[in-house]
Image (cartoon, coloured by chain):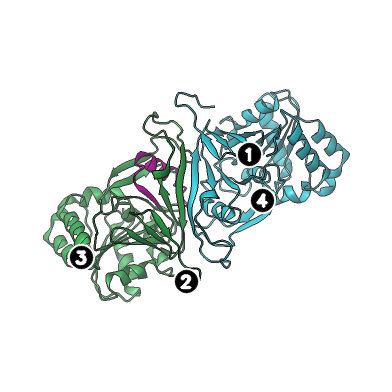
Chain colours: A green, B cyan
Amino acid sequence: MQLNKGTLIPIGGNEDKGDEVNEMYTMEFIDEGILFHVVKEAGGVDSKIVVIPTASSIPVEVGENYLDAFSKLGCTNVTVLDIRSQEDSEKQESIDLIKSCDCVMFSGGDQSKITDRIGNTTIHNILTERYKNEEGFVIAGTSAGAMAMANEMIAGGSATESFIKGAVLMYKGLGLIPELIVDTHFIKRGRFGRQSEAIAKFPNLLGLGLAEDTGMIIKNGNDCTVIGSGMVIVFDGSSLTHNNEKVLEEGTPMTMANMTVHVLSNGDQYDIKNRKVSVLPIEAPFI
Amino acid sequence: MQLNKGTLIPIGGNEDKGDEVNEMYTMEFIDEGILFHVVKEAGGVDSKIVVIPTASSIPVEVGENYLDAFSKLGCTNVTVLDIRSQEDSEKQESIDLIKSCDCVMFSGGDQSKITDRIGNTTIHNILTERYKNEEGFVIAGTSAGAMAMANEMIAGGSATESFIKGAVLMYKGLGLIPELIVDTHFIKRGRFGRQSEAIAKFPNLLGLGLAEDTGMIIKNGNDCTVIGSGMVIVFDGSSLTHNNEKVLEEGTPMTMANMTVHVLSNGDQYDIKNRKVSVLPIEAPFI
């Protein structure tokens, strides 16, 4: 397994306000310290942070919201890179920013916009290379921005109560952490079914279900630590004894037996390669 | 293990309409065939069915709704038994009805009302004895009515995103199926956390998470078959390697590692004693 030197911070999204533009309310998770962790991992308040609101349908507002949010944390060097096309990803200005920053923060929205506009471009390559080789380089993303970190990316899928083949849409993500399938807003939006289907499709991968206001700091492409106030549910399909995904027709109810599931909370650690949980000592403080 | 001769049918509730009185919309699940299964197990449209709307805050309306619903299925012998106190559970009329019926149907609402008003009364004893000894005797319940079937009953608990000790409230249920902890409305109301905490408290029990419009037909107190359109998630805590529930203070984030989880759909079967899934053959029809 490749030892990546950078840091990934997928985040489960902020609290759902029940409207279309919930991406705007990124202030929500600052109080809880998630964004503080991003800044800390990036090297502190003077680190150069680039916000990419590409996933959003309201990128200008979301960009401004992040500028405010980082500013309130004391950050002095934050830029919004509003990429709206593959061409934008090839611009020298974009390339220079991605080459020189300490941290990239992907907003929420539609993860397919991230992969369509940034995937396989020069800045995607730079992000990948810097993440592989540069200690302290941070790629954070919330909601869509977290989901796009995977290689097998959940692009959509109805959050129905049923567990029916064909409900989940998979797409190629940025491939930063190919061992994982990342889902977000996990509990409140009832995404158990679509993550299960994703794992049924790719049982050798690990499913990560991030609740709102919850994230993982991932180092070495392997060592995960839970941050925030909610749960992270880890789905390990390697123990499955029944998985009829391959043979079922679309629309048919599915079954998965003997999936191994971990429910992790603040401070808990997970080793991807060894598929092993390390639990926070009981006396440890909230991080 | 005791071999009960009756049939239990816990149901995950009907579709949540987002208001306080969603119990009224019990018509919802008839189209999907859940209530049809209840009638079939009870012996058909001429069987004597007693509806107990005790859990509900609007028992009269709920009772009428069930009369309508069963009537539309062709049932000819349905009675509402509106028990509102322990005294009601000791009335000769109540006792006679429970002694003579083929099927009892508990409505949704607040499961604590069921245990407070019916638990440890004469009709509770009759229900228990008939369920143990009489083949074909059916006890069905939706939502609160399903949850009350357990011995360790989830009485409440916030459906937060977090997995915090003390979030779930446990209470003594009717004890019809002591091997299970039953939760309902499982996916849409985000009850993963509270069921996990319940299992952390009682790791030798099995957690059943029933989605809306989904139920289990349980025979012999052991053999479960999924009915309806959604998922049933089975939590088996016997494989847990980390469970810090006992030592944590209330309000502290929890961890559970290596829980075994099954995601079951229509027609799938589960053997409680042997903790074993039997999957529907691929060519089998929706039941």
- Label 3 environment density (alpha carbons within 10 Å; few <14, some 14–19, many ≥20): some
- Pointer 2 residue: A284
In this rendering, would A188 be left or right of A41? right
Q: Secondary structure at mark 3?
A: loop
Q: Secondary structure at mark 4?
A: strand
Marks 3 and 4, how far apart in space? 52 Å
Q: Which mark is residue B152?
A: 4
Residue stretch in magenta: A188-208
Q: Is residue B79 visible?
A: no
Marks 3 and 1, how far apart in space? 55 Å
Q: Secondary structure at mark 2?
A: loop
Q: Say if mark 4 contacts mark 2, CB within 8 Å.
A: no
Q: Say if mark 3 contacts mark 2, CB within 8 Å.
A: no
Q: Which mark is residue A134?
A: 3
Marks 4 and 2, how far apart in space? 31 Å
Marks 1 and 2, how far apart in space? 41 Å
Q: Say if mark 1 contacts mark 2, CB within 8 Å.
A: no
- The kind of residue tagged 2 is Ala
Q: Chain of mark 3?
A: A
- Pointer 1 residue: B10
Residue B275 on image: x %, y %? 56, 40
Q: Secondary structure at mark 1?
A: strand
- The kind of residue tagged 1 is Pro
Q: Say if mark 3 contacts mark 4, CB within 8 Å.
A: no
Between A214 and A3, the one nearer to me in the picture: A3
- The kind of residue tagged 3 is Glu
The quarter holding residue B143 reads top right
Q: Quadrant of the C terminus of chain B?
A: top right
In this rendering, would A244 be left or right of A220? right
